[in-house]
Image (spheres, rainbow, N blue to C red):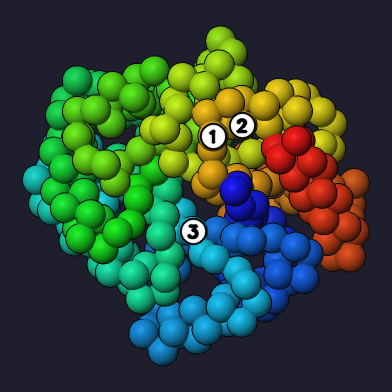
Amino acid sequence: MMKFGTGYSYWGNNWSCDYLAVTNKVANIGFDILEIGADHLYHMSEKDILELRKAGKEKGVEFTTNSGPSKENDFASADEQIRKHGLEYFTTILEKMKLLGSKSLVGAIYSFWPTDFKNTNKELAWERSINCLKELSKTAEQLDIECALEVLNRNETYILTDCAEAMIYCDKVGSKNINILLDTYHMNIEEDNMYDAIRRAGSLLGHLHVGECNRKLPGMNDSINWPEIGKALRDINYEKAVVMEPFLLTGGEVGRDIRVWRDLSNHADSEMMDKYIEDSLTYLKKCCLG
């Protein structure tokens, strides 16, 4: 059965988090999953990781791990030392995920995010990043962790921008532990038909991010046909994570990086933000589970 989650950054506008407090919050709202930051996990001590793992087990919350890699860890870089550093970085993250009990590493781990478009040689980017992912996939297979590669829009990458090319890319990597992350926000920009893209991905769909076309919560404005999203997921017998990635608050690091230039929350306080996401979860489950 599908499991439902949210990204950790919904309640703030900086890329930081009190994970124990947010784990408790998402459990009370009714989520199955909290998606945490890979770089946060990279810098966590073993003590902190085990404490978070314990909290998740007590609250019935699983953790998925999301990465928007820095340029210093770019698998598509022309600099061999940067690619080597990236491989060491992600190997450490996978090892810490195993300690946490996190089974899915997701995001644009094939390059860095958001790209600066200073080099857009796609053929070379594919060759370099695929070779790195072939190496990383060996560790992922050993640790029984899936890596879902996020398909982004043209303004954030040039490497993977639609489902069809992501499927070709994954085939070239050639690992059962490397699959695809589709995101309704990015699909709305790039896919001819996002519902058919989900069906096309089929068993290669390893993770789904959901949000309205302006990154509000599912159901806040119905810019996307959520019942049709649910039908497409059921058509492929999808039984993995459906994770909200909403961004409503302007300002701070999140507002800058996601480009939220106006308040999308109607100036909601913390209590109203909780209600928004709880109502959205109820709606999303109804659409996805049928």
Question: In the drawing, what numbered circle is on residue 234?
Answer: 2
Question: In the drawing, what numbered circle is on residue 237?
Answer: 1
The image shows residue 262 at horizontal and vertical percentages of 78, 41
Q: In the image as oriented, which residue stretches furthest toward the left? A: 80
Q: Are marks 1 and 3 in contact (CB under 8 Å)?
A: no
Residue at the image position 71 percent from the left and 23 percent from the top? 228
Q: In this view of the protein, which residue sits in the foreground, 149 or 12?
A: 149
Whole-angstrom CA distance, mark 1 to mark 3, is 20 Å
Asked whether residue 200 is in view, the answer is yes
Asked whether residue 152 is in view, the answer is no
Residue at the image position 58 percent from the left and 26 percent from the top? 235
Q: Are marks 3 and 2 in contact (CB under 8 Å)?
A: no
Seen in the picture, residue 91 relative to 154 is either above or below; the reply is below
Q: How many marks?
A: 3
Q: Earlier in the sequence, mark 3 or mark 2?
A: 3
Would you call the spot at circle 3 few (<14 residues within 10 Å), some (14-19), or many (20 or more)? many
Look at label 1 and name its amino acid.
Answer: Asn
Q: Are marks 1 and 2 in contact (CB under 8 Å)?
A: yes
Look at label 2 and name its amino acid.
Answer: Arg
The image shows residue 210 at horizontal and vertical percentages of 64, 39
The image shows residue 191 at horizontal and vertical percentages of 53, 16
Instruction: Indicate left or right for 201 with 18 as reference.
Output: left
Whole-angstrom CA distance, mark 1 to mark 2, is 5 Å
The image shows residue 285 at horizontal and vertical percentages of 75, 45
Would you call the spot at circle 1 few (<14 residues within 10 Å), some (14-19), or many (20 or more)? some
Residue at the image position 77 percent from the left and 50 percent from the top? 281
Whole-angstrom CA distance, mark 3 to mark 2, is 22 Å
Instruction: Indicate left or right for 162 with 288 as reference.
Output: left
Would you call the spot at circle 2 few (<14 residues within 10 Å), some (14-19), or many (20 or more)? some
